[in-house]
Image: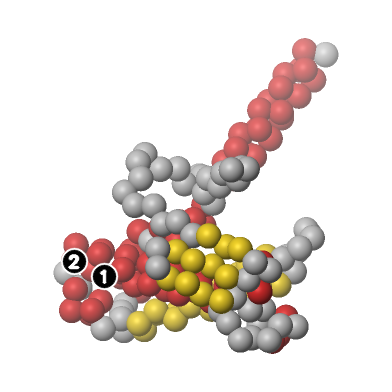
Amino acid sequence: MFVARNAFKISRTFVKTSLRSQSRTLVTLKDHKYTAQALAQGAGRNGEVTSNGLDLKLALPKEMGGTGQGQNPEQLFAMGYSACLLGAIQAVAKNLGKSDMAKNAKVHASVHIGEPEGMPGFGIAVDMKVEGIDEELLKAGHEFCPYSRLMKNGGVVNVSLT
């Protein structure tokens, strides 16, 4: 009985430890250096969005049954991620002595929307392709980029009523 009880405790501890080691490290902030704010209103993906003087009309893409005569959240995410990754690459390039290489880099982002595995609704997947740099700089920039960290590790999202 003693052996079986200890084996159960060891097994339970191993499972808990294994599950803990597989979890992601959630990105949390120590402080806020800048806060972007946006307002979406109207008909959701066919409505309007505004942020600090940038006003856009939104439209579902034709591939999803819309008119395609406006921007969509996936385009905005792709633009933000590509700009952020490029900035991260250029920031870490200085420390690696590769500033000249980084200044001509180009980042191509593809953001896909579709049905996720094992859950209802929609999900996104992202492909990032970078030209003009080497693998070392790409890896360092990807590790430094806040968008990459968010996609890899997740982040805190607070949703509440105003």
The image quadrant of residue 141 is bottom left
Residue ID for mark 2: 94
Residues packed near mark 1 inside 10 Å, few (<14), some (14 to 19) or many (20 plus)? many
Q: Amino acid at mark 2?
A: Lys
Residue 84 % position (x, y): 38, 67
Quadrant the N terminus occupies:
top right
Task: For mark 2, give the secondary structure.
Answer: helix
Expressed as whole percent of the image width and height from the top left, the position of residue 105 reads 30, 81
Left or right, residue 19 beside residue 144? right
Q: Is residue 40 left or right of residue 37?
A: right
Report which quarter residue 81 is drawn in: bottom left
Secondary-structure class at tag 1 = helix
**Residue 56 drawn at (x, y percent):** 51, 75
Residue plotted at (36% across, 39% down): 30
Q: Is 124 placed above or below 149 here?
A: below
The residue located at (49%, 60%) in the rendering is 38
Residue visible at 25% across and 76% down in the picture: 102
- Residue position marked by numbered label 1 in the rendering: 90
Q: Is residue 81 visible?
A: no
* Residue 14 as seen in the image, left or right of residue 82: right
Circle 2/circle 1 CB separation < 8 Å: yes
Q: Amino acid at mark 1?
A: Gln
Q: Nearer the viewer, residue 86 or 49?
A: 49
Q: Residue at x 20, y 73 (%)?
A: 98
Foreground of the two, 21 or 52: 52
Q: Outermost residue, right direction?
A: 1
